[in-house]
Amino acid sequence: MTAPVFDVARIGPGEGSIDPRTRLRTDAPSQSLDGCWSFRLSPSPALAPHDEWTQGETEGWDEITVPAHWNMSGFGTPAYSNVQFPFPIDPPYPPDENPVGDYVRRIDVDAEIRQVMDAGGRALLRFDGIESAADVFVNGIRLGSTRGSRLTHEFDVTDRLTGAGDVIAVRVAQFSDGTYLENQDMWWLPGIFRSVTLLARPVGGIDDAVLTGDFDHETGHGAVAVTTTAGAVLEVPELGIRVDVAAGRSTVDAGAVEPWSAETPRLYDATLATASETVSVRLGFRRVRADDGVLTLNGRPIMLRGVNRHEHDPDRGRVHTTELARRDLVLMKQHNINAVRTSHYPPHPELLDLADELGLYVIDECDLETHEYEYVSWRGNPSDDPAWEASFVDRIRRTVTRDRTHPSVIMWSLGNESGAGCNIRAMARWVRENDATRLIHYEGDHSSRDTDVYSRMYASHDEVRRIGEESDEIAPAGIGAAELRRRSLPFVHCEFGHSMGNSPGGVKEYWELYERFPRLAGGFIWEWIEHAIAIEDEHGRRAFRYGGDFGESVHDHNFVIDGLISADRDVRPGLVDYAAIIAPLVITVEGDRRGIRLENRYDHVDTSHLAVTWRREVDGVVVAQGELDVPPIAPRQRGVVPLPAEARTVSASSVADVLTIVAALRDATSWAQRGHVVATGQRVDAGAPRLGAAAAPDQGEFDRRGRPLRLGSLDVVEGPGIGIWRAPTDNDLFPGWDEPTLPPMAERWALARIDRMQTRVRGIRPEATALVVDTRVGAPSFDSGVDALWRWSDVPEGRLLELDLRSIGSWDNAWIEKAPFAWTVDWARLGIDVTLAGAPVGMEFAGYGPGPSYPDTDSGVHFGWFEAGADELVTPHVRPQESGSRRGVRTAVIRTSEGAVRVSVVGGEALDAGVALTVSPWDRTTLSTTSHASLLPAPTATHVSIDIAQSGVGTATCGPGVLPRHRLPARDASFALLFETV
Ligand code: GAL
């Protein structure tokens, strides 16, 4: 028999599968069908052969591994687009160019499953994820179809299997009617990308069951709600529970229990058993509520310190591996994150097991996004077309049903960016009728009429403040009942802090607001992982690629590279910053070192699991340290702890006397070792460097333009000169959402030409104790620039530079003709640029580190004496851009393959704050004109910038640009540096 026409353009859910069931662990036999399948790719459904393939005729076919995406397995190439659709909006039709993958596997059914079947049991064929639509056949008979790429479908194959040599055949289309509901911002990755399993269903087994734990914080008692298709015995050994439960719904009193929370992920093993099957569940007792505008768990307010997580593996795409999922969640926990939104589809089921176990709140999102309709002003949006209702409801039903036993899931999200409409309402209705134990989240309809929380993405700080005050207005017609209700809901910032490139800035300011207003329940950084795809480049090296690199005609470049960790799971500086901002303990050293203030920001636990230690370092040497006796501070309470005399002392120093307080885990947990640092507080008292008498230097050591030929033991290749530009970060290239009509910063810089400034030496004057060089740095065609007076002298310690900088001309756009709006040319930075001989080898520095920071991303750094190796100097952003600045540096040794130089701050305004030091293997022009990190040339020199001031980085790619307080308007400066040979 030949396969019938493959219909991939009919509105509706898949058909032929059984009703969705809860994902349960069972002792009923199962057989994994993952592994090697026969595979054939056709260019479109019309061209897919109607031969005998469903009966196992696969001669000449290729092979593919399941689970995998075929375009990550050598059959085609991946493609990336965000909001824009890769084909015309012509629902429900996919384009003609619509690759079709045929999969065939011949199986012998395992003896255990055959036994169950011989005894009258059934067999199910389960698919956990097929993108985007499939027809399923067993031994040539079509069983039905799937829709909903990240949703589970099970087919009853009892009457189709013979037991030996059975042919499982699946025809998969990359695009289908379903694609109109799956326009998430990610790679288009077709295929059977999650597991395929054959399941035995024993006679008298538990076909479906829901077990959820409820916690009553007033009594401290738990209850188990059980819904089961078969009468069974419920056992929770730790609680002494062993009861018979009838088919249907029942509630079992669990007595006194320890509740589950992200901070106390207490799970109880439970089983539900009939004579023929035992299913096991890890029960967590918790109750989530929206109480009078406050999000609570177990009766206490909770703060969501969240991230958005897509499933991404740089080598496999959205194929899950336990190892990477665990690594992600452990990394989250280690960085104080307590919540994940599974953007924008239900994750692999195992992720939720891990979230239950490690302790993370989950917003489990339905596989739904119709964002492409934004391109046509939402005309014809399926969300409001009754013809699509069954598809929408099927999707949420499959989401909720699969995941409803997990205590970690505290909200169901109806989908992402799909506008408003009757089908969104129908989904919410279905959830309300079927699961009362979680809240409903959806961002796409700002009226919140169907949700339990008010959710927004990338709202400005000002708007978030107004939301906190309940004074924000979205219904201009006035404050009706619906608007009042919306304002009474807890607020969730489901996306904020867009982590694209050197980013996100302004997160601390959001957090201050979340902490201030009880209505604000926290937020989720966009996003966790960069979705770069790894390839082997022409030199055989591992390299990362983004949108457009695979020949896509419609794509969104590197907008998919916007994570707190790289695709290879390297921590980006943004994550270190976020971890400190959301730290559950805030440590403040009182001004005079009398004591410390501790603010416990945990919602459920006191501080007794943390050891608080102090350490005093003077010029890099630890002079005293000890542990503080901190009485347990209750959740959301504060305490003050005195410091011992040795910690309070401040000695004279040349660099700094630093008191550091660290709170670390007393005992190992499932996600960190004993001693893992949770929070840090500091007090830095700057030292006063002393210099001997100055003398004029030998003019022969300078070139004819008054520039030193050497610094330390290093030849100067270029400069030193004055710089106010940086290699644009991703954020610099976008107008902030707070200034949408103004040119992005990078464009302003280009218009003002500060990226190609020219220097004129106005005079070189030998004086008694110095060589004085007067320069003017100006932008071509304009009269704006920076005048710099360089005073070079020799002191016994080395070569001294005293520098005076004066901004000249105007730095608004008045001088740029026909500009329709007023704007300023804020500078990227203000400092010295010098290129030194030799490729960089590393540096040692006393300053804020160990990693890079900018004025609005400086929470995660602390003062110390650090070393950075050659590969730690700058951040290997996939699209090259400015990075690597170490701030508050007082002294540093820069090492290149040719030698070294020590640079120290010895005077001027930098004495208090230090300087920002950037040591880079590449100059800014190279960085700004190279598209991929892997294409950067091998370093030949070391590019050093010593900045007295810098601009923040903001989050303009999505959200506000650099906040006014972190910008750098044109300004004057003066400071002094000492260069020494080491
Ligand atoms: C949001 C969207 C995300 C992602 C982000 C930009 O609008 O929900 O999926 O596209 O913008 O990176």
Image: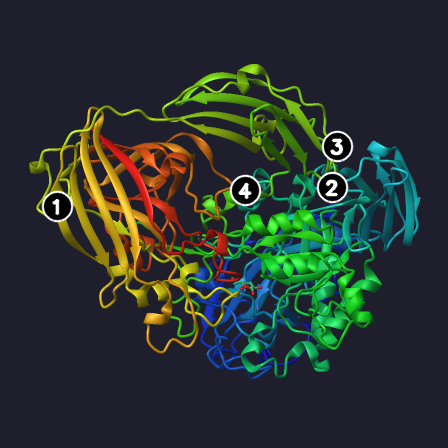
* Label 2 neighbour load within 10 Å: few <14, some 14-19, many 20+: many
In the picture, measured across the screen, residue 44 lies left or right of residue 432, that is left
| Residue picked out by circle 4 | 327
Q: Quadrant of residue 311?
A: bottom right
Cα gap from disc 2 to disc 4, whole angstroms: 21 Å
Question: Which of the two discs, 4 and 3, labels the residue nearer the N terminus?
Answer: 4
Gap between marks 4 and 1 measured at Cα: 59 Å
Q: Distance between the residues labelled 2 and 3?
A: 16 Å
Identify the residue position indicated by label 1 in the image: 764
Could you say which is closer to the camera, residue 11 or residue 196? 11
Coloration mode = rainbow
Amino acid at the residue labelled 3: Ala
Q: What element carries label 2?
A: loop
Label 1, residues with CA under 10 Å away: few <14, some 14-19, many ≥20: some
Q: Which quadrant of the rendered structure holds the N terminus?
A: bottom right
Q: Cα distance, mark 1 to mark 3?
A: 66 Å
Q: Name the residue under label 3.
A: 634
Numbered tag placed on residue 946 in the rendering = none
Q: In which quarter of the image is ligand 1?
A: bottom right
Residue at (74% x, 56% y) in the render: 490
Closest to the camera, between mark 2 and mark 1, is 1
- Say whether disc 4 or disc 1 marks the residue closer to the N-terminus: 4
In the rendered structure, which amino acid carries the disc numbered 1? Ile
Q: For mark 3, does the 10 Å Cα neighbourhood hold few (<14), some (14 to 19), or many (20 or more) residues?
A: some
* Residue highlighted by disc 2: 261
